[in-house]
Image (cartoon, rainbow, N blue to C red):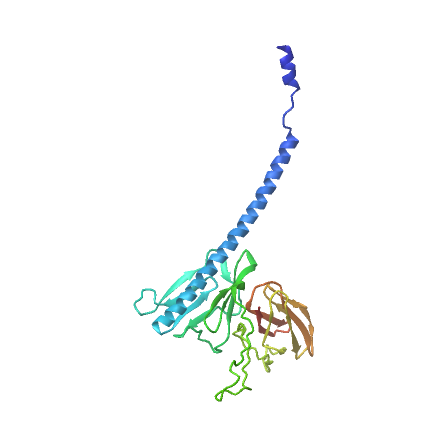
């Protein structure tokens, strides 16, 4: 009996230090798991919202062709949109409003997307072959989102699902015929239309007057370049008097320099930081009281 008690008193258990280490490891693992869970949930909400709006765009296009009329999907806010189509198969289109999931919104800061389909299933725009592009992201991760494209022909694509058509040469195969000239060869290529629905003239605006203190001029009212650093655009800003100019822009863009003193003319370089596409606004503001916004379109 005495020997048994000695053995029990000599055994060692878990100390305070070991217990604290285990608790700390469990806390770190739980924190990482929680962060990943929140990020995955935010990404899933973006995917569900984009899938829903793309589905309603496809339905509106089919409805316009079926009724030989017009159907539309128009955003009324960054988080909601109205679909105007025949939901009841009565031949009469009726509007219904739908919302993105919590925290999801359109990140374009120029204009809200608006797409209208005609009886041929094509988009009704000023330029018949332009592409409407907008990005959707979660407010907790504004630089991680999905891009939606609606082509002039009415095709709706999400992110990188837009097909790339091969270059196809066309040649006549009949070499001896009285009705076909041997020298007639028709050559051409088919490529995906990615012309943005923006004014791409690049002409500078003259005569925009700010406050009586000064007048600010920008060499281009709209610029365009590729996403994720694939290109850049340079604009020249000039003032009627020497003054400091500060640039405001969304987080997916970078303007260099972000501020500088401008007199007769100074250059600012604009580029994209990530894969978000669509029209955005960059505003040049002078300390003397004048400001000027330009449209920036980020493409594939």
Residue 178 x %, y %: 49, 89
Point out the residue furthest to the front here. Answer: 176
Residue 223 position, x and y percent, is: 59, 74
Quarter holding residue 278: bottom right
Q: Is residue 90 left or right of residue 267?
A: left
The percent position of residue 260, horizontal first and vertical second, equals 69, 70
Please indicate whether residue 96 sits to the left or right of residue 297 in the image: left
Residue 75, how many percent across, how many down? 45, 66
Write the residue at 43% across / 63% down.
55
The front one of 132 and 171 is: 171
Answer left or right for 278 relative to 62: right
Give the quadrant of residue 283: bottom right
Instruction: Identify the residue at image location x=65%, y=16%.
Output: 7
Residue visible at 51% across and 68% down?
Answer: 133
Residue reaching furthest to the bottom: 178
Most foreground residue, 97 or 244: 97
**Quadrant assignment for the C terminus:** bottom right
Q: The N terminus is located in which quarter?
A: top right
Question: Residue most toward the top?
Answer: 1
In the picture shown, does residue 46 fall above or below 157?
Answer: above
Q: Is residue 143 above or below residue 166?
A: above
Q: Is residue 153 left or right of residue 276?
A: left
Residue 147 appearing in the image: no
Task: Kindly identify the residue that appears in the image at 34 percent across and 67 percent down.
Answer: 86
Total numbered labels placed on residues in the image: 0
Observer able to see residue 174: yes
């Amino acid at each position: 009996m005495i020997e048994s008690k000695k053995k029990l008193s000599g055994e060692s258990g878990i100390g305070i230090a070991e217990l604290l280490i285990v608790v700390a490891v469990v806390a770190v693992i739980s924190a990482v798991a929680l962060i990943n869970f929140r990020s995955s949930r935010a990404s899933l909400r973006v995917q569900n919202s984009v899938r829903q709006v793309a589905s309603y765009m496809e339905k509106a296009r089919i409805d316009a062709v079926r009724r030989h009329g017009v159907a539309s999907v128009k955003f009324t806010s960054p988080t909601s949109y109205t679909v105007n189509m025949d939901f009841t198969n009565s031949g009469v289109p009726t509007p219904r409003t739908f919302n993105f999931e919590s925290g999801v919104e359109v990140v374009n800061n120029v204009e809200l997307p608006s797409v209208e389909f005609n009886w041929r299933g094509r988009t009704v725009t000023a330029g018949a072959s332009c592409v409407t592009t907008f990005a959707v992201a979660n407010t907790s991760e504004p630089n991680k989102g999905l891009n939606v494209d609606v082509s002039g022909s009415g095709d709706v694509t999400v992110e990188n699902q837009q097909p790339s058509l091969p270059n196809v040469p066309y040649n006549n195969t009949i070499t001896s015929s009285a009705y076909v000239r041997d020298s007639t060869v028709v050559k051409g290529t088919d490529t995906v239309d990615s012309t943005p629905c923006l004014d791409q003239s690049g002409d500078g605006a003259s005569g925009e007057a700010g406050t009586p203190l000064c007048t600010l001029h920008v060499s281009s009212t709209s610029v365009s370049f590729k996403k994720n650093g694939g290109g850049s655009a340079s604009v020249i800003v000039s003032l009627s008097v020497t003054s400091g100019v500060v640039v405001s822009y969304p987080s997916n863009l970078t303007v260099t320099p972000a501020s500088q003193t401008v007199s007769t003319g100074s250059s600012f370089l604009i580029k994209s930081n990530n894969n978000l596409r669509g029209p955005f606004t960059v505003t040049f503001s002078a300390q003397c009281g004048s400001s000027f916004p330009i449209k920036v379109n980020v493409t594939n």
